């Protein structure tokens, strides 16, 4: 053995677990003994340990017969659920012997056929007893379990009992029986249950439960599309009564059929328009999206856009609003005239407290503003700007500054594109020179003064009167530049000069020593005062408080 080159190599170690019991699980003998215990809690603990060990790779062949003898007929509900998990992981087939594998390899044919364990016959009998159990919830849970079983030899003997459950009086049993038929037909349709779609179609004609009808239609949708379309054609007017799940399946079927054969669109148009007015937001959204993807007719696009707008103004979830706005933006690119008709309804979403939604609304709306609706749009924007100054609650403060800047930019854009509205908005915006959006306002005023000489006199007079409210230095610089650049008449020059000198005060423009000393003294006294220290404490009832 060579000598380690590196000193670290002499200290390298690794651990091999001798069996699964190294992690704390009991051994196979202990599990087998605990399964014989009459206490259900002990049995559950043992069966959990067996499942964990088998998931870890341990075969544990002795446990199967113990479970069949002592657990399979128990009335304990948690133990029954554990038994179902156990049937999923337990090996169900005999391993081929070496002689069989060798013979198959010598013959050069397929590998030897698997043989079901003899014990699984007893398991199938227990499963059948649960399928015929008088308690509907035992039946239903067993039918749900069978949706996870893929073995033809196990499902085969249970098919008659599954079919009988389709006519059970309780809807919980019927809806799970439909899923079991779907699962069996999907895996072994031609051999196990070739008449599955016909059985489900007959069940659908008589079914009254929403969930059972949905599961049955799901089976037809995937396994026999023609029967699903036939049922839909007969009950086209009643789709709205069949629940949201059924309606979403109908929409998925519509997309699937029309994508394969576009000539089939006319068969589904009526049901799509019917679903647009559904009380469910998910159904109406999916119906609108499906209608847009299948048709470019103005009537269809307008109906979908109206649905999107109603969802935008009726839903409280911000994520839903953003998704709907994305759809409206997509429609805007191809059908801007239709979005123009709904522009005022879209602008109603500006009432949202979320600035991201407001920004998206303005992005959608500003591109479709025309000379016919610009006056209404600017009126809405001015009202929103005024509201940002009036509202004082915390949510408005969080939104206010960013939102106000967005509104000013939108109004600026409208004034640049449509000069007729400039005069009506600039006077309103000049009241916000002292706010956080003052820089954007004064830049807007500068552009208007430059582009529209007819408005200069009134704007300069308004600007002179608002100089005393400006508190931002950069904004004041732009104000002074505007006054110096565009005050050309003697009266305006005199008025501007007098206002500026009044704001400056009496010369010299220095701070008096007495005022400076008084200010420094006030700052020192404030710093030397008692400081308030706060900390978070936990009260006796477990809540937090600030102390």
Image: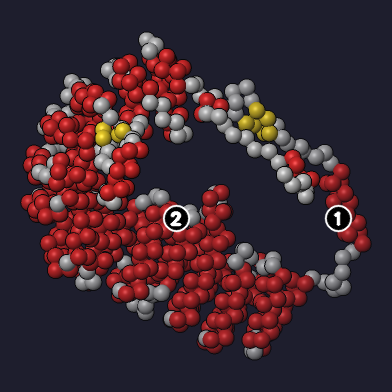
Note whether 509 is above or below 249 in the view shown: below
Q: Is residue 288 visible?
A: yes
Percent x, y of residue 505: 79, 70
Percent x, y of residue 94: 31, 33
Q: Which one is in front, 5 or 455?
A: 5
Sequence-wise first label, 2 or 1: 2
SS class, disc 1: helix
Percent x, y of residue 534: 73, 36
- State the residue at coordinates (8%, 39%): 206
Q: Which one is in front, 503 or 167?
A: 167
- State the residue at coordinates (52%, 66%): 406
- State the residue at coordinates (55%, 29%): 18
Q: Is residue 204 visible?
A: no
If the image is split into quadrants, where does the C terminus sit? top right
The image's mark for residue 519 is 1
Q: Which one is in front, 252 or 9?
A: 9
Protein image colouring: secondary structure
In this view, the mark in front (2 or 1): 2
If the image is split into quadrants, where does the N terminus sit? top right
Task: Determine crowd level at label 1: few under 14, some 14-19, many 20+ residues with C-alpha closer than 10 A.
Answer: few
Residue placed farthest to the top in the image? 38
Percent x, y of residue 467: 67, 71
The image's mark for residue 352 is 2
Note whether 10 is above or below 160 in the view shown: below
């Amino acid at each position: 053995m060579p000598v380690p080159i590196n000193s670290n190599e002499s200290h390298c170690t690794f651990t091999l677990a001798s069996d699964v019991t190294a992690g704390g699980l009991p051994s196979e003998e202990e599990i087998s003994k605990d399964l014989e215990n009459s206490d259900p809690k002990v049995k559950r603990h043992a069966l959990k340990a067996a499942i964990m060990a088998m998931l870890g790779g341990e075969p544990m062949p002795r446990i199967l017969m113990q479970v069949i003898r002592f657990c399979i007929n128990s009335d304990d509900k948690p133990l029954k659920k554990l038994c179902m998990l156990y049937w999923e992981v337990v090996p169900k087939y005999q391993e081929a012997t070496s002689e069989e594998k060798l013979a198959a390899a010598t013959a050069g044919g397929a590998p030897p056929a698997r043989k079901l364990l003899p014990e699984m016959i007893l398991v199938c009998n227990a499963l059948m007893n649960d399928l015929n159990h008088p308690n509907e919830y035992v039946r239903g849970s067993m039918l749900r379990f069978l949706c996870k079983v893929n073995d033809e030899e196990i499902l085969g003997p249970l098919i008659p009992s599954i079919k009988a459950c389709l006519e059970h009086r309780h809807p919980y049993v019927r809806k799970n029986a439909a899923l079991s038929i779907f699962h069996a037909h999907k895996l072994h349709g031609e051999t196990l249950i070739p008449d599955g779609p016909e059985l489900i179609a007959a069940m659908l004609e008589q079914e009254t439960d929403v969930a059972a009808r949905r599961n049955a239609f799901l089976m037809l949708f995937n396994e026999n599309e023609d029967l699903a379309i036939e049922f839909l054609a007969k009950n086209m007017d009643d789709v709205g009564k069949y629940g949201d799940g059924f309606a979403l399946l109908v929409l998925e079927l519509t997309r699937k059929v029309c994508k394969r054969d576009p000539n089939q669109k006319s068969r589904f148009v009526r049901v799509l328009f019917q679903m647009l007015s559904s009380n469910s937001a998910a159904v109406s959204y999916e119906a609108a999206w499906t209608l847009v993807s299948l048709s470019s007719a103005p009537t269809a696009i307008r109906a979908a856009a109206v649905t999107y707008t109603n969802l935008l103004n009726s839903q409280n979830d911000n994520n839903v609003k953003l998704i709907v706005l994305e759809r409206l933006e997509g429609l805007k690119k191809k059908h801007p005239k239709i979005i123009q008709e709904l522009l005022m309804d879209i602008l109603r979403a500006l009432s949202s407290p979320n600035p991201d939604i407001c920004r998206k609304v303005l992005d959608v709306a500003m591109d479709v503003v025309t000379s016919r609706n610009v006056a209404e749009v600017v009126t809405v924007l001015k009202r929103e700007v005024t509201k940002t100054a009036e509202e004082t609650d915390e949510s408005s403060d969080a939104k206010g500054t960013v939102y106000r800047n967005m509104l000013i930019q939108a109004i600026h854009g409208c004034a640049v594109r449509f000069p007729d509205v400039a005069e009506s908005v600039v006077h309103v915006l000049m009241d916000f020179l002292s706010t956080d959006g003052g820089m954007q306002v004064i830049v807007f005023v500068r552009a208007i003064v430059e582009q529209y000489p007819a408005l200069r006199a009134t704007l300069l007079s308004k600007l002179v009167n608002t100089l005393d409210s400006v508190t931002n230095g950069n904004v004041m610089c732009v104000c002074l530049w505007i006054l110096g650049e565009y005050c050309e008449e003697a009266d305006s020059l005199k008025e501007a000069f007098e206002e500026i000198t009044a704001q400056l005060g009496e010369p010299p423009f220095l701070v008096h020593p007495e005022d400076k000393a008084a200010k420094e003294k006030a700052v020192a006294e404030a710093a030397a005062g008692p400081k308030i220290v706060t900390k978070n404490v936990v009260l006796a009832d477990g809540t937090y408080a600030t102390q």
